[in-house]
């Protein structure tokens, strides 16, 4: 019980930044009100954007929101960007508000396919095109999707772990996966298995257990990992964690057991906490997804659709994604993720995602200097 509490408390520390951001962010809807119409900027075409959560990853408030704001502005769009904070009811209420505000396009990163599809259907009934952002809504009706090659994200995670455990015959692996209701989590898993399955089959690696985590709940991820670890007699050689938030919760448990830095852990999102864990050597890798390009793609697509220029939109979204539930293909723009170990952290800094001062303080100053960061 005590250890559980500690894990939760420690995992909570990692979120304090995101939570602070979320607290600050909540001021906006209360004051401006997504349900009330905001004065559009001169000539700006209104676009609504709904992000899914803050606590599942620091990316949504830390990267997506500011990058979408800038990208939409650059396209001359007046974007109302809100975050549903993991609440499906709030997600639909925000959408209703934006629809009645008269948005010309709705960009949605949904909590799950159900609510995403319901919102897309409602918008469609009013002639408002929707763009699925980052997460594809299975069985939905959005005609466009902007994201990354998410199978590749998983392959990079699988490859990272395989590299880290090379030569360690029979190394025991625990997999802490994303939400089963997020299609991305399935794609990440599939990508990981493309690399890891043959290694499990040959006995090069041994799978202890693979566990999806409802709602990408980072704290639940830590508790679940701890239970699996205990059930395996405290033995683990490597951990697939589907994103940096889950990795942080896993590392907290490893630290308690004196195993952090000895057991490679994967991640994703290149969040400040994730990058610091990589620099400390507690996390072997993260996946850097250039979200600026994702935001710019969504903004360009929204600008084209707002004008009714589907030819231009089709040109931007020249790729295609499968929606197995809807048995359809969705026009897509899928960007390339990048494997990021210690040596690549400087790229994330050079591209302006995090400042050296954010990640290179205190004990990490020396390693940053050594790696040429800052
Ligand atoms: C996103 C990840 C994120 C996760 C949890 C996924 O759909 O692609 O970047 O870490 O959701 O928010």
Image (spheres, rainbow, N blue to C red):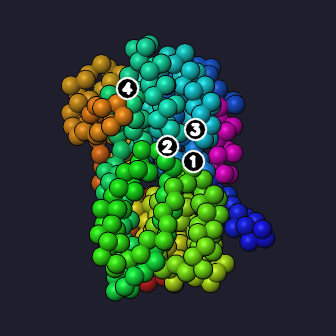
Cα separation, mark 3 vs mark 2, equals: 18 Å
Q: Earlier in the sequence, mark 4 or mark 2?
A: 4
Q: Report the disc number at residue 159.
A: none
Q: Is residue 20 magenta?
A: yes
**Nearest the camera: 198 or 38?**
198
The kind of secondary structure element at disc 3 is strand
Q: Magenta segment, principal secondary structure?
A: helix
Query: Which segment did they paint magenta?
Result: 19-29
Q: Nearer the viewer, mark 1 or mark 3?
A: 1
Image quadrant for the N terminus? Answer: bottom right
Residue 311 in view:
yes
Q: Residue at x 39, y 55 (%)?
A: 188
Q: Earlier in the sequence, mark 2 or mark 1?
A: 2
* Residue 288 place in picture, x, y as percent: 39, 60
Q: CA distance from mark 3 to mark 4?
A: 21 Å
Q: Which residue is mark 3?
A: 83
Question: Can you tell which quarter of the image residue 106 is in?
Answer: top left
36 lies left or right of 141: right
**Disc 1 marks which residue?**
215
């Amino acid at each position: 019980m005590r250890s559980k509490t500690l894990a939760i408390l420690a995992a909570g520390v990692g979120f304090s930044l995101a939570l602070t951001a979320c607290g600050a962010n909540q001021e906006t809807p209360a004051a401006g009100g997504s349900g009330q119409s905001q004065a559009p900027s001169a000539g700006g075409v209104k676009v609504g954007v709904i992000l899914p959560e803050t606590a599942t990853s620091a990316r949504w408030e830390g990267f997506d929101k500011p990058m979408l704001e800038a990208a939409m502005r650059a396209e001359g769009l007046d974007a109302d960007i809100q975050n549903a904070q993991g609440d499906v009811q709030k997600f639909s209420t925000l959408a209703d508000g934006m629809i009645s505000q008269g948005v010309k396009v709705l960009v949605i990163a949904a909590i799950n396919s159900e609510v995403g599809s319901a919102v897309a259907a409602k918008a469609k009934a009013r002639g408002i095109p929707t763009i699925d952002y980052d997460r594809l809504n299975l069985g939905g009706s959005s005609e466009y999707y902007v994201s990354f090659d998410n199978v590749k994200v998983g392959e990079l995670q699988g490859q990272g772990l395989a590299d880290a455990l090379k030569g360690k015959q029979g190394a025991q692996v625990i997999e802490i996966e994303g939400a089963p209701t997020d299609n991305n989590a399935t794609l990440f898993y599939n990508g990981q298995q493309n690399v890891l399955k043959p290694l499990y089959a040959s006995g090069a690696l041994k799978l202890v257990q693979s566990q999806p985590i409802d709602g990408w709940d980072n704290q639940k991820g830590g508790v679940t990992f701890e239970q699996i670890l205990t059930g395996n007699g405290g033995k683990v050689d490597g951990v697939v964690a589907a994103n940096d938030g889950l990795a942080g919760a896993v590392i907290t448990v490893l630290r308690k057991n004196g195993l952090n830095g000895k057991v490679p852990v994967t991640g994703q999102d290149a969040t400040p906490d994730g990058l610091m864990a990589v620099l400390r050597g507690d996390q072997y890798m993260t996946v850097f997804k250039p979200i600026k390009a994702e935001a710019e793609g969504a903004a360009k697509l929204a600008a084209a659709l707002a004008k009714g220029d589907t030819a231009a939109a089709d040109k931007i979204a020249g790729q295609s994604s499968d929606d197995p539930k809807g048995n359809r293909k969705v026009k897509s723009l899928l960007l390339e993720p990048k494997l990021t170990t210690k040596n690549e952290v400087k790229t994330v800094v050079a591209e302006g995602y995090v400042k050296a001062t954010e990640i290179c303080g205190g004990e990490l100053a020396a390693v940053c200097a050594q790696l040429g960061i800052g």
